[in-house]
């Protein structure tokens, strides 16, 4: 018999921000750009009480809850805690799948003979809570679909097991929205058919669903009946990291654009070194005010050094930038990642370079990813945060050839 567990970190981005700034605990928090053109990337349960949800326009969210605290967030912090949870899971179970920064599937098949799958998953959950401080929920059943739905029912910060043979009865009274593959369009189509609860979907003829939804009709019927044979795919390390920014107002300010690119590249390079990764491909993305999007990439020797990556980013931007058109969005991506530590060049001042990066990264690990930045990237400090413990602005690192 299969045993599949689904783990989901509760309001992950908000939980990380609350670890960094405990003053946010118990308050409605929105993660995303404060710009009216931005969207809500994540929100706390307190904010959800005002009918706010992720992907909602920030302008609407602020109208629904004017007292909400808006935090732009920092991808470096989120990846740090996500990696911590991943390592704990890696040490505990033989096979797991990481489907997002905060969501995991575990294949515990066979482990019930030795440990008891529910007990094992429960102990794993408690260890994650104790070592990271993050709330996490899980559902346990015979397949991915039922376990994921069970996790949703267990939230917040709880756990649930659906025994063998109880899958259909567990799903029956729930809303069809609970089925993982049911999006807005599918939901509306089912509502037009008079379907509100999964029980109704379970009783519908398979032929009818196939006529309405095509091949997806069978998958929908199977999920509604608690049938899912999809395997847990072994987790493999990510091959790229990226960040991008949409401006509140389209701009043509070249100094501002280059400063933000510098800050982005710095942040990504710090993430590389923190994860002991190297990149060999740099890409820059520009979206103009007419929504035309251009990208350009360049292969380089494997590195995680700022002083190598920053000039490449600026060079790619110079080739892409059209000064006659306003810019709506810019982004940076490092790809073709491999495990490894920074390699110094034969002609570099080895000790000076290594000590510089060690000092910068030590400060960032303690006070946040934007606590030390280059002077040219100061105009982009809004993409990160100042020192959360003292409120002081980030330290400056003047431009120089390290």
Image (spheres, grey):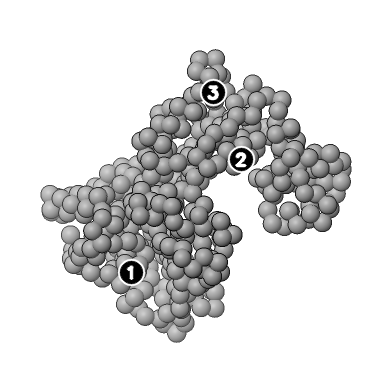
Q: Nearer the viewer, residue 87 or 351?
A: 87
Q: Nearer the viewer, residue 265 or 87?
A: 87
Marks 2 and 1: CB-CB under 8 Å? no
Q: Residue furthest top?
A: 113
On the image, the x and y values in percent for residue 261 come to 35, 67
- Identified at 60% across, 29% down, the residue is 161
**Location of the C terminus (image quadrant):** bottom left
Whichever of labels 3 and 1 marks the residue nearer the N terminus, that label is 3
Q: Nearer the viewer, residue 61 or 338?
A: 61
On the image, the x and y values in percent for residue 74 come to 38, 57
Give the crowd class for mark 1: few <14, some 14-19, many >=20 residues within 10 Å: some
- Residue hosting label 1: 380
Give the crowd class for mark 2: few <14, some 14-19, many >=20 residues within 10 Å: some
- Identified at 84% across, 39% down, the residue is 203
Q: CA distance from mark 2 to mark 1?
A: 40 Å
In this picture, is 114 found above or below 133?
Answer: above
Whichever of labels 2 and 3 marks the residue nearer the N terminus, that label is 3
Q: CA distance from mark 3 to mark 1?
A: 48 Å
- Identified at 50% across, 15% down, the residue is 114
Q: Between label 3 and label 1, give the one nearer the viewer.
A: 3
Q: Is residue 348 left or right of residue 162?
A: left
On the image, the x and y values in percent for residue 361 come to 24, 51
Whichever of labels 2 and 1 marks the residue nearer the N terminus, that label is 2
- Identified at 50% across, 23% down, the residue is 119
Q: Is residue 66 left or right of residue 399?
A: right
On the image, the x and y values in percent for residue 365 come to 26, 49
The total number of labels drawn is 3
Which element type, helix, strand or loop, lies under badge 2? helix
Which element type, helix, strand or loop, lies under badge 3? helix
- Residue hosting label 2: 153
Marks 3 and 1: CB-CB under 8 Å? no
- Residue hosting label 3: 117
């Amino acid at each position: 018999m299969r045993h599949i567990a689904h783990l989901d970190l509760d309001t992950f981005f908000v939980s990380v921000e609350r670890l960094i700034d405990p003053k946010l605990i118990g308050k409605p928090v929105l993660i995303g750009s404060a710009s009216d053109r931005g969207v809500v990337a994540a929100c706390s349960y307190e904010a959800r009480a005002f009918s706010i949800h992720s992907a909602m326009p920030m302008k609407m969210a602020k109208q629904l809850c004017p007292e909400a605290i808006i935090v732009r967030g920092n991808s470096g912090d989120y990846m740090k805690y996500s990696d911590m949870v991943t390592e704990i899971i890696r040490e505990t179970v033989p096979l797991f799948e990481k489907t997002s920064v905060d969501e995991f599937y575990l294949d515990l098949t066979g482990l019930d003979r030795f440990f008891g799958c529910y007990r094992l998953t429960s102990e794993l959950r408690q260890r994650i809570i104790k070592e990271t401080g993050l709330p996490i929920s899980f559902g346990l059943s015979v397949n991915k679909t039922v376990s994921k739905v069970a996790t949703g029912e267990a939230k917040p910060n709880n756990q649930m097991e659906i025994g063998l043979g109880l899958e259909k009865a567990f799903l029956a009274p729930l809303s069809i929205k609970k089925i993982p593959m049911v999006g807005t369009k599918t939901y509306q189509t089912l509502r037009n058919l008079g379907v509100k609860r999964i029980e109704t979907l379970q009783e519908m003829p398979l032929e009818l669903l196939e006529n309405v939804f095509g091949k997806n009709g069978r998958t929908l019927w199977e999920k509604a009946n608690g049938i899912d044979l999809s395997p847990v795919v072994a987790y493999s390390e990510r091959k790229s990291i990226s960040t991008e920014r949409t401006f509140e107002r389209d701009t043509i300010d070249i100094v501002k654009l280059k400063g933000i690119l510098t800050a982005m590249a710095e942040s990504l390079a710090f993430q590389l070194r923190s994860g002991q990764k190297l990149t060999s491909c740099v890409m820059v993305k520009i979206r103009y005010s007419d929504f035309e999007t251009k990208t350009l990439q360049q292969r380089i020797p494997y590195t995680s050094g700022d002083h190598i990556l920053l000039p490449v980013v600026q060079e790619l931007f110079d080739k892409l930038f059209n000064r006659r058109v306003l810019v709506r969005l810019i982004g940076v991506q490092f790809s073709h990642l491999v495990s490894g530590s920074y390699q110094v060049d034969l002609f570099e001042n080895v000790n000076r370079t290594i000590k510089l990066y060690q000092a910068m990264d030590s400060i960032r690990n303690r006070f946040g990813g934007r606590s030390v930045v280059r002077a040219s990237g100061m105009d982009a400090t809004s993409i990160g945060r100042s020192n959360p413990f003292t409120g002081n602005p980030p330290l400056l690192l003047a431009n120089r050839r390290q």
